[in-house]
Image (spheres, grey):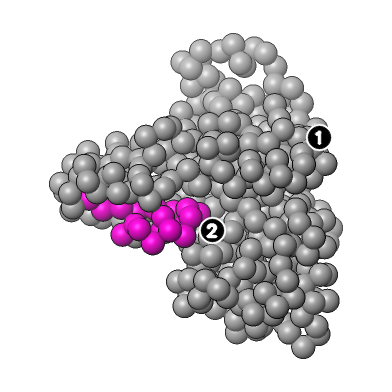
Amino acid sequence: MTATMTKQALTEDEALALYTNPETCPADKLEPIPLAEEPAFIAWQRDIPKQYLDMKPEELDVRISHARAKLGERVIILGHHYQRDEVIKYADYTGDSFKLAQYAAAQEKAEFVLFCGVHFMAESADILTRPDVKVLLPNMAAGCSMADMADPDDVYEAWDIIAETLGEDVKVIPITYMNSAATLKAFVGEREGMVCTSSNAGKAFEYAFERGEKILFFPDQHLGRNTAWAAGIALDEIVLWNWLLPDGGLTPEQLKKARVICWQGHCSTHQRFSVEQIEKARKEHPGINIIVHPECRWEVVQAADQNGSTEKIAKAISGAPAGSAWAVGTEINLVNRLAKQNPDKTVFCLDPVICPCSTMYRIHPAYLAWVLEGLLQGEVVNEVVVEGDTRKWALVALERMLALP
């Protein structure tokens, strides 16, 4: 596999071209950019025994079901909306990253949390659960290319440059999207900032502006820009920090005028959606409802009828009247599931090309069987652990998020 991006792997022009062009950064590639090295957490994973990869779906189903029954309340399985149906059917709880964070924090009995999502979600679950609870990620290769676009060293450097440019009298509050490493959650927690999800980004901005004059938001530029715009901030007061360029590619004057500084990062899946797709859907389906995720580009969100988190999208469609039609701008597994759950409505994905979250897709029933049967034998496979000050300050940032009204 390829790994997450390092600046040494590509020239500046090559990286910019790939990360800003959806045609060269398609969602069906496991990772958009070839890297010089793999993320450290992948090294923690043992190779899955070949016997599991050779099992037919029927055998995997029997073995997973048997292990679940034997383990009982000792284990809960959390499944993100973007997971494939073959995995979601085993989940005790499903939801977006915010809802699953709440589930993890509420656990009182389980010894093990099996998180069918990606690495940053499992880290958050480990931070929020009791210290004696073990959080397992079935496949350590399930990362997030967006999260990898905010390398902690780059963020630390940007923070220092911004502080030096603005001076001590200007207070900047950092906010990190849930799609980020635990070290960055700790970074914002220690600096009066907080974590947010697409469900509560607006409230996170309110929190920040009550405490400071400016926001540094990372890693998703589109959620940052869309949230700022919804809060009434003009586009010329929203700037983009390009971590590949000296001083983020911004002048001191631009930083001083800005109210929100967005990080140059994005979701490869959501960046595929376009205004042209929306126009085509409206032409072919008069009266159709267009709903998109706020990780889409600003102009796409503006062209849609509604935008919101995966939870909001699911609730909007489920609560809509029979016979209504919906074109959806988000990950294909969720869209297909919503279509099946709402047979009285027309529901389809805006992008005609299949657009799965490719790293999420690395969670396969074979990995569930491997991890669950390991627990039956007293063996813990692929535990995700956040320790020390990182855990302490990341918990502060996450608890601030959970405390939002």
- In the rendered image, residue 278, in percent from the top left (x then y), is placed at 33, 49
Secondary structure, mark 1, is: loop
Which range of residues does the magenta coloring cover? 288-305
Mark 2 to mark 1 CA distance (whole Å):
27 Å
The numbered mark, 2 or 1, whose residue comes first in the sequence reads 1
Residue 370 found in image quarter = top right
191 or 107: which is nearer to us? 191
Q: What percent of the width, then of the height, locates residue 384?
A: 73, 43
Answer whether residue 296 is magenta in the image: yes
Circle number at residue 37: 1
Q: Tell me the amino acid under the disc marked 1.
A: Glu
What residue type is disc 2 on?
A: His
* 342 displayed left or right of 44: left
Q: Decide if residue 200 is in sight here.
A: no
Would residue 391 be found to the left or right of residue 340 on screen? right
Please say whether residue 210 is visible from this viewpoint.
yes
Magenta region includes residue 137: no
Q: Which residue is mark 2?
A: 222
Total numbered labels placed on residues in the image: 2
Q: Residue at x 67, y 74 (%)?
A: 254
Q: Residue furthest bottom?
A: 169
Label number found at residue 126? none
Decide: is 200 above or below 21. Answer: below
Q: In which quadrant will I find the N terminus?
A: top right
Describe the element under mark 2 as helix, strand or loop: helix
